[in-house]
């Protein structure tokens, strides 16, 4: 027997049985296994009690599917090295009111349902919570081809296209919702925007005066570094007269000022830097500062070059020691 044949038999044996990765259990649909009478009864009861949704005759139903009737086909489902991390994150932030129905395809001859969309939810709900779910809500598709290989292709196509027509909600689009639910970072950012009469836009490209270069950057600073840091940045830009300059609130400028704030974390240093930058930056255009920083540090990225250039200014003019913060952020 050749080595090739041995490998093929070994691979077949692996795929013919249950595949276990972490807490994820899946089965090869091409392998017919024994089905108990109790499973047949449970499937038939579930199947006949499904409620049609959508257009009549569309083959789309809703039902609470008992978890023992759910299976995953690893031939097209996603398992990557990041899967355990994603599962833990989902488990730690689990909320019943956010649990959307899965999408499954009925396999009547196997007396089960294969998950097309919802595999992570299924895994967490059945293995990673204090109280495991006995059934999960699902949209059941019954219009798949009866031929097993064609049906698997049908499922794989659904899996690939499941997010193609879904427009991802951007951070900017979430801003008003975050304000409504009392998100502290969004509230802090909105207060700064109102105080300094600054706006934000969704479209990319060069920013006009008093427009954020990156809403996501500003929100991230508010969330991770807090209101004091955000005030430090907005007030320096305003005092320097950059509010009226194109790209005065650019991503590079805001992150650069944030980084020097982090590099010298004491309130005394913050006061000294605030006074100094508010005056010193009046004599330079923000675009020119970015260009000078790039020229001085050509091998560092734009955010780092601005921060390094600003740090050099306080080292040379205020006598600050060079900070190790920038070495750690290379």
Image (cartoon, helix red, strand yellow):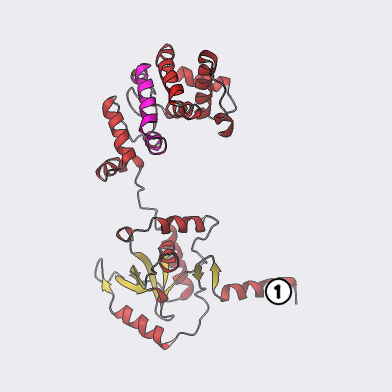
Q: Specify the quadrant of the image occupied by residue 328.
A: top right
Q: Which secondary structure, mark 1?
A: helix
Is residue 94 visible to the viewer in this orientation of the structure?
Answer: yes
Q: Position of residue 130 (x, y in %)?
A: 40, 66
- Above or below residue 151? Residue 316 is above
Q: Position of residue 237 (x, y in %)?
A: 38, 21
Q: Is residue 187 covered in magenta?
A: no
Number of marks in the rendered image: 1
Residue at the (60%, 27%) spot, across then down: 299
- Above or below residue 205? Residue 160 is below
Residue at the (47%, 55%) spot, across then down: 86
Q: Position of residue 260 (x, y in %)?
A: 48, 26
Residue at the (27%, 41%) spot, across then down: 179
Q: Residue 72 or 192: which is nearer the viewer?
A: 192
Q: Which residues are magenta?
A: 217-243
Residue at the far top: name it: 283
Residue at the far bottom: name it: 37
Give the class, few, some or many, for how many residues have Cα within 10 Å of label 1's Cα (few <14, many ≥20).
few
Q: Specify the quadrant of the image occupied by residue 208.
A: top left
Instruction: Using residue 311 as the reference point, say whether residue 93 is left or right of it.
Output: left
Q: Position of residue 36 (x, y in %)?
A: 44, 86
Residue at the (42%, 28%) spot, across then down: 254
Q: Which residue position is annotated with label 1?
A: 6
Q: Is residue 233 covered in magenta?
A: yes
- Above or below residue 85? Residue 136 is below
């Amino acid at each position: 027997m050749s080595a090739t044949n041995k490998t093929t038999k070994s691979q077949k044996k692996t795929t013919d049985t249950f595949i276990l990765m972490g807490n994820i259990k899946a089965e090869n649909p091409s392998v017919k296994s024994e089905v108990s009478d109790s499973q047949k009864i449970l499937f038939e009861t579930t199947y006949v009690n499904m409620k049609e949704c959508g257009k009549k005759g569309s083959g789309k139903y809703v039902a609470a599917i008992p978890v023992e009737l759910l299976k995953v086909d690893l031939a097209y489902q996603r398992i990557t090295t990041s899967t355990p991390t994603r599962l833990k994150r989902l488990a730690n932030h689990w909320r019943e009111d956010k649990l959307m129905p899965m999408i499954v395809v009925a396999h009547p001859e196997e007396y089960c349902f294969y998950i097309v969309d919802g595999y992570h939810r299924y895994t967490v709900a059945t293995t990673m919570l204090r109280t495991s779910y006995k059934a999960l809500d699902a949209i059941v598709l019954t219009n798949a081809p009866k031929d097993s290989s064609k049906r698997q292709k049908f499922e794989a196509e659904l899996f690939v296209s499941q997010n193609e027509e879904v427009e991802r909600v951007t951070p900017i689009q979430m801003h008003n919702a975050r304000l409504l639910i009392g998100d502290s970072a969004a509230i802090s950012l909105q207060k700064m925007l109102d105080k300094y009469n600054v706006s934000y836009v969704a479209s990319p490209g060069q920013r006009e005066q008093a427009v954020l270069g990156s809403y996501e950057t500003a929100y991230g600073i508010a969330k991770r570094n807090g209101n004091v840091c955000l005030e430090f940045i907005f007030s320096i830009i305003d005092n320097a007269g950059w509010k009226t300059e194109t790209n005065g609130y650019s991503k590079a400028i805001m992150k650069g000022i944030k980084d020097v704030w982090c590099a010298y974390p004491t309130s005394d240093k913050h006061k000294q830097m605030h006074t100094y930058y508010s005056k010193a930056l009046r004599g330079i255009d923000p675009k020119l500062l970015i260009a000078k920083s790039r020229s001085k540090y050509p091998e560092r990225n734009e955010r780092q070059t601005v921060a390094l250039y600003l740090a050099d200014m306080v080292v040379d003019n205020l006598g600050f020691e060079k900070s190790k913060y920038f070495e750690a952020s290379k």
